[in-house]
Image: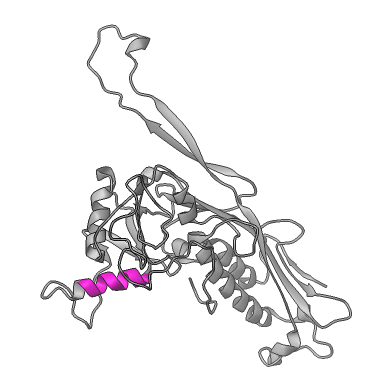
Amino acid sequence: MAIVVKNTNYNGEVLETILTTASTGNELVSKGLIMVIPGVEKKISIPRLKTGKMLQKQKVNPTVEDSKGNFDYSEHSLDPKDFMAFTTFNPRAFEHIWRKWQPKGNLVFSQLPPEAQNALLDALSKQVQFELGWHYVNGEYGDTDEKLMDGILTQAAKDPDCIVVNSESTTMLGVLKDIRASIPKAMRANPNLRILMSIDDFDRYDDELTQREHKNSDETEMNRMRYKGITIETVAAWPDGVIVATLCSPDADGNLFVAVNLQDDESVIQIDKYSNAGELYFFKLLMKADTNIGFGEEFVVFDGRENPAFKNPAGVPEGASEKGVFGLENVTDLSDGEIPEGDGGQA
């Protein structure tokens, strides 16, 4: 008999593990940087309302012609795309893992207790978690298995209202100074304001601070993850050379959004024999996801990669060379949609 898991409790932590992977299994969510909208079957919209200037001189008898200001309503959409995890395995190859739970007679996976099933589910969920973390940031929707959905950076690059920062500096301190100067003044005091960057870029920033004598931490300590009072957040899947300042929150007062759903087709999670005559079993997980930003005006981005996805009319900064704006060959360009190799660890 197949193991078919619906959106209900199944063996406690077994389903909980997969649900966590599907909706909260990467750093953007675990660090509270993005709002997750669960249970989205079809396309939904992020409502955006802007107003013009309203105040004017007092008039004794104002008319329609005296009306000033307007309400501009627009939407950004979240359109979850279908994808799945599917793999086959031979339970006998893992007998040593669950030997103490092994049933007598034929080894039938559906007879194993939750502890044994978790041995495989946990391994698969870690890999799904690693891949989802990359797609949430860098994903691009297309026809191949590497292009499952549009990630945050892909969606933001389509928005002409994003504030693209040009910087001629070849240091992290100089680039961060230019980014901060480009942040709208109304955003600077917002407690949700964050600077997002890769781990390598923060290490570069940390090294620059350490080299400043008598002002920051020495080589045995790490400097605080802040710049001019703005908290810096590192994301393992974030590409080198791209630095973003935006509002981040797990609620609607942030600027990053993701819609997810464990697709309720015939099954959500299914484990069964691949064929009646064979020993192979298969594991299948169906789900949907999509990301987007709310307001381009609240997305301040510097792109120092060799082939930047974010450009403004002023062009690429003069500091950008064939080795990237930092003059370093290891500035990573993930714009080609290639998922880096990983060991299934947390992204």
How far across and how far down the image is residue 270, in percent? 74, 68
| Residue 43 visible at all | yes
The residue lying furthest to the left in this view is 214
In this image, 106 relative to 56: left or right? right
Number of dots carrying numbers? 0
Q: Quadrant of residue 52?
A: top left
Within the magenta stretch, is there residue 200? yes
Q: Quadrant of residue 242?
A: bottom left
Towards the viewer: 201 or 31:
201
How far across and how far down the image is residue 43, in percent? 61, 45
How far across and how far down the image is residue 163, in percent? 34, 47
Q: Residue at x 65, y 79 (%)?
A: 120
Towards the viewer: 307 or 173:
307
Looking at the image, is 273 positioned above or below residue 299?
below
Q: State the extent of the magenta-drawn residues as a range.
A: 199-208
The residue lying furthest to the right in this view is 277
In this image, 154 relative to 296: left or right? right
Within the magenta stretch, is there residue 276? no
Q: Residue at x 51, y 77 (%)?
A: 345
Q: Residue at x 61, y 68 (%)?
A: 18
The residue lying furthest to the top in this view is 61
**Which SS type dominates the magenta stretch?**
helix
Q: Quadrant of residue 283?
A: bottom right
The residue lying furthest to the front in this view is 322
